[in-house]
Image (cartoon, helix red, strand yellow):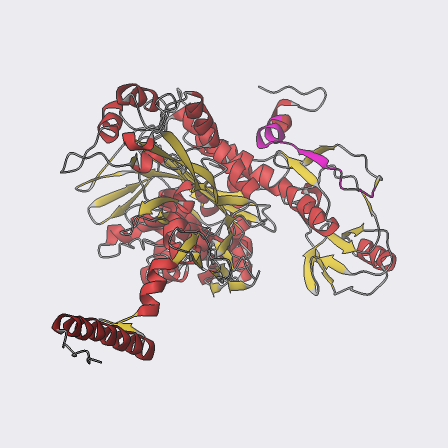
Amino acid sequence: MKKKRFRFQWGAFLLLIFYGGLFFLLFSRMFMLQATGEVEGQELAARAAAKYSKESAITASRGKIYDTNGQVIAEDTLSYRLIAVVNEKATTDAKKPRHVVNAEKTAKILADYIPMDEDKIYKQLTRVNDKGEKPYQVEFGSAGRGISHETMTKIKAEKLPGVLFVNDLKRYYPNGIFASHLIGFALKEENKDGTFTTKGKMGLELTYNKELTGKDGKVEYETDAFSYLLPNSEKMVTPAKDGDDIYLTLDKTIQSFLEESMTEVEKEYNPESMTAIVADPKTGRILAMSQRPTFNPDTREGDNMKWLNEAIEETIEPGSTMKTFTLASAIDTGVWNPNAWYMSGQYRVLDQVIKDHNNGRGWGPITYLEGFQRSSNTAMAHLLKLIGEDVFFDYLERFGFGKKTGIDLPNEATGTLLSKYPVERVTTTFGQGSTVTPIQLIQALSAIANEGKMMQPYVIDRIVDPSTGKTIKKHEPVVKGQPVSADTAKQVKEILASTLTAKDGTAKDFILNDYEVAGKTGTAQIPLGNGRYSWGSNEFLYSFLGMAPADNPQLIMYVSVKRPKLKGNELGSVPVSKIFNPVMLNSLKYLNVNPEDVKHVDDTSIQDYTGQSAEAIQVELANDGLKPVIVGSGGKIIDQYPKGPQKLVKGNFVFLKTEGDVTLPDFTNWSLRNVLAFKSMANLEIEVVGEGFVASQSVSAGTVISDSSPIVVKLKTPAESFKQDVETPPEGETTE
């Protein structure tokens, strides 16, 4: 048998070497990948995560701003963002277009609904890039954001192809014009990554932007190559952290009284500007603050308006309101003699003459008390000589003039006390030349109203983490000093009250029927520059710095009206009183300051009554002059409001919570504050309509509430409260 001869196959050998090498390289590569988990210096796990891991943002809400009673002043609310799909590729069925077909028509219709010109909308709809390519979709900046549900519905009704809406959040100010220069506003701004963040632009929204701004969260998950969620993948959720909530010292009801009165005076007198502040002299809490011209923070619309908070950031020559503190200085130093006489009319300082406001004629020789009641400038000049110039300016510094109050607001001005020349020292006694801020006047007056103790003004009550309810920051009242004694403060109040009641008093326009007011009017010339001042009845800054009730002031208030258009021989105090009187009257009633209790305001102590018999404590509190309200069917007390121990003014409500069904009380004449306290303690569905005091309730008093049916409580509006007092005279009397 013939043996087969072996033939070496070079081709097969080369193929074996080639494929064997490839296999070796592939095996080595796989081994290295398994061992190191890296490729080209990058981790494979990271690259896979980048390709298949997805994340979705969880938007954080901006913190809310509340008034002192928990009423919302500013919050985020649902709105819509306008988007227009402009690329034809979005449409798959010509009969049902999903892109903008007619840009000209679309632009014309949208211009009726969003604040953007038709031609600008058209340019946006027809925009192309450098390569002449259309984007898939376009937006319209701030004009296309924050769209209300009503506007969105109207645009949808136009049935414009390619026009879409995306849910969005908008900063919302439900009260419209409401302490606008204090609250400020916030707007959405686009970030570098294309996302949007709401940022404060003015007022508290800007000052406390860091606290109000939340931190967005995210959801992380894994998908396959087709972006479907993998069944066994784990979602990793980083929750959003909402911004902190800010509770102000402002009281919505009192602020509403103020806004309404200022709007009415603005319409009637068309002044150049107005400023007003209402405060609690016992604590320094600012209860209301406003100015005119102003704006609506939702629209930022306002005419001839300064963006400054004039109560804090702008200085004025205060006029005769400064005489309050000249008087206090004289009394405190022991040189005040109300029955001493001086010659009114004119007072010479070197080569310059100080004149009284009746063109320097004066009223002949009169007493210092009459001089103050008549608002005599020369009386103040004579008092300065008795007090001593250095001593007088030391008192002004004690009252906080010439330096910041330290209020928790930005850009506070200091004002300037002029004392270089003799005439400047004299004119400062009656409020001309030297400058102050309205908030300094409020702080200084708190010393007169509060037995000599001067309280620092503040507007932030507390800052709260909404997720935990924990108070992050709490503002407590701060005593800034005691510029005068309690006895001096008492005498000043009595003399200020006489400017309303004396035969020749200048503040008669500020008399209230139910409460005694103490205060001082001001008529200041307005500086024009170069030492010149304006002159004429329509060219002054008219003001009033007052408090009520005079014996034990619960509220202090400053009002100024600049260059009002007065009617005929009308005094400048009239438009000022049309703000001060209704606001002070309605606010005191709202705070349950009873006129018959004004002369003798007593307080009493309450304790922590938890675990005790509600019926027994009810009798005890009633005997102490308080108004106890049992919330429940009686028995052991499980909670109370206000908490004890603390002191309360007699006549205040004390709510005692017990187990069992709630019997509805008679809410007539209850303040909003007390209604809200009862609502919270009883956990009932009580709908409050209106402002002021309760006029009616939908469910009769004495009804046992055992279900969650809503109860409607109607309050008198500010206008109704005031107009009823003015327009309904007692029987047999008429009004002019």
If the image is split into quadrants, where does the C terminus sit? top right
Q: Is residue 220 above or below residue 204?
A: below
| Residue bounds of the magenta highlight | 705-723
Q: Is residue 677 above or below residue 719?
A: below
Residue 502 shows in the view: no
If the image is split into quadrants, where does the N terminus sit? bottom left
Q: Is residue 633 left or right of residue 479?
A: right
For this orientation, the residue located farthest to the front is 1
Quadrant housing residue 289:
top left
Residue at 54 percent of width and 42 percent of height: 252
Residue at 37 percent of width and 20 percent of height: 95
Residue 350 in the image: x percent, y percent?
21, 50
Quadrant housing residue 531:
top left
Residue 348 shows in the view: yes
- Residue 706 highlighted magenta (yes or no): yes
Q: Nearer the viewer, residue 538 or 381?
A: 538
Q: Nearer the viewer, residue 138 or 408?
A: 138
Residue 305 in the image: x percent, y percent?
32, 35
Q: Is residue 405 left or right of residue 730?
A: left
Q: Nearer the viewer, residue 194 or 718?
A: 194
Q: Is residue 530 left or right of residue 156?
A: left
